Image (tube, rainbow, N blue to C red):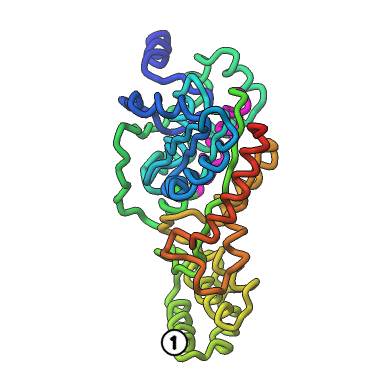
Amino acid sequence: MGGYTIHLYKSVPILIIPYPYLFKNIDLSDEIKDAEAADILVIGDKMGKSLHRFIPRSIKKLSVNLKSPLKYYNWAREHEGLHRTLFKLKSLKNIPPVIIYLGSNSEFYEKKLNARDHKIISTNFLRYKNPKISTSIMALPFLSKYLYQTPKFQIISQNITQDKSEYSSIYKQVQIKLTYQIFEHELEELLETVKVKETNLITLTSPIKLDLPPNKTCDNAKTDTLLKLQKDIEKFINKGDFKIAFNRAKELSLVSTGNAKSFYLLGIAAKSLGKFKEAKSALQKAHAYDCLPKRSNIIFNNIIRKYVKKHGIILIDFSKIVQHNFGKDYVFIDNFYPQEIFYENVLKQIDQSIQKILDI
């Protein structure tokens, strides 16, 4: 027993929050200097990176009456999940007074958990949510070695590598559910970190092109009957018989819970009839049920809305701004990026928030 205790103490990492991944051999030295020198720091993934086309204009305008221009650094990176963003932010000794977060599109890009350990991971987070256990671990961090179970940790290293593994639908559904759960904890830690370091965070939801088809329907949500009915509905859509397609798709959606394609067909038919409220609801479900998600969706945006409200953080609802124009053909320039007019709308709100924060 004593030998096992010693082995456990030496081999198992200390964790306050039981994330199923570990960071190793990551060198941020070339970036930290620029990040710490900034007055305004942008973090996130490709969507955060896209702000670089616009924010320098804001910096120039906001700096007009200042002795020296505001310093700005965009630290958002392609394919960067919140786990990496949080790690980077926690590596800073000096935190910029304004941080802008726009992400959640890359949470499934890199493997950061082993879904076969789902019971261990879920149990650990339940223990973390127990006030007595979490308080004990915060007071004496080494207790985490004994109070948490040990999963097979995923190693997060310098380079971001896409997870190209093929998974069964059951495995993927477990992975997706855990990814949402982990994202919640990462986001809350991000918000707590900002509060502790006494800086200011501006958070944006991610705009979503709703009428994109889901990448995959989970196998356990399919039946031969459903597939046949979906093909029939597709024929009506292709012929322009949207009313028939809509009525059949609506009936089908009632008996095909969890089937991404059924909701996609309903959404497309509803959109074609100008039933935009029903179309948005159906297409949001299609994205949420996607068995091979590759972008953000309503679940991530709702998590952001929930925790930002809880912590009293500034929220700019980029997604809501864009979806207000749902049904118009010009909204997106591709599968990810909205037209410049929507960025301009968001930048006005960012400028106002920065002015208020910095009192300029």
> Does the magenta portion include 191?
yes
Question: Residue 69's spot in the image, x, y percent?
Answer: 51, 32
Examine the rendering and report whether any part of residue 217 can be seen.
yes
Picture residue at 55% right of the left edge, 82% below the top: 272
> Does the magenta portion include 200?
no
Foreground pick, 338 / 128: 338
Which amino acid type corresponds to the residue marked 1 in the rendered image?
A: Asn
Image quarter hosting the C terminus: top right
User: Magenta segment, which residues?
Assistant: 177-196
Q: Residues within 10 Å of mark 1 (few under 14, many from 20)?
A: few
Foreground pick, 243 / 262: 243
Foreground pick, 174 / 189: 189
Q: Would you identify the image quadrant in which residue 152 lies?
A: top left
Picture residue at 55% right of the left edge, 36% below the top: 63
Question: Residue 5's spot in the image, x, y percent?
Answer: 43, 12
Question: Residue 297's spot in the image, x, y percent?
Answer: 52, 56
Question: Residue 247's spot in the image, x, y percent?
Answer: 60, 84
Picture residue at 44% right of the left edge, 50% below the top: 53
- Would residue 73 be found to the left or right of residue 99 on screen? left
Residue situated furthest top in the rendering:
2
When the figure is inspected, residue 41 is found, relative to residue 267, above or below; the finding is above
> Which residue position holds label 1?
238
- Would residue 166 be found to the left or right of residue 138 on screen? left
Image quarter hosting the N terminus: top left
Task: Give the SS element for disc 1.
Answer: helix
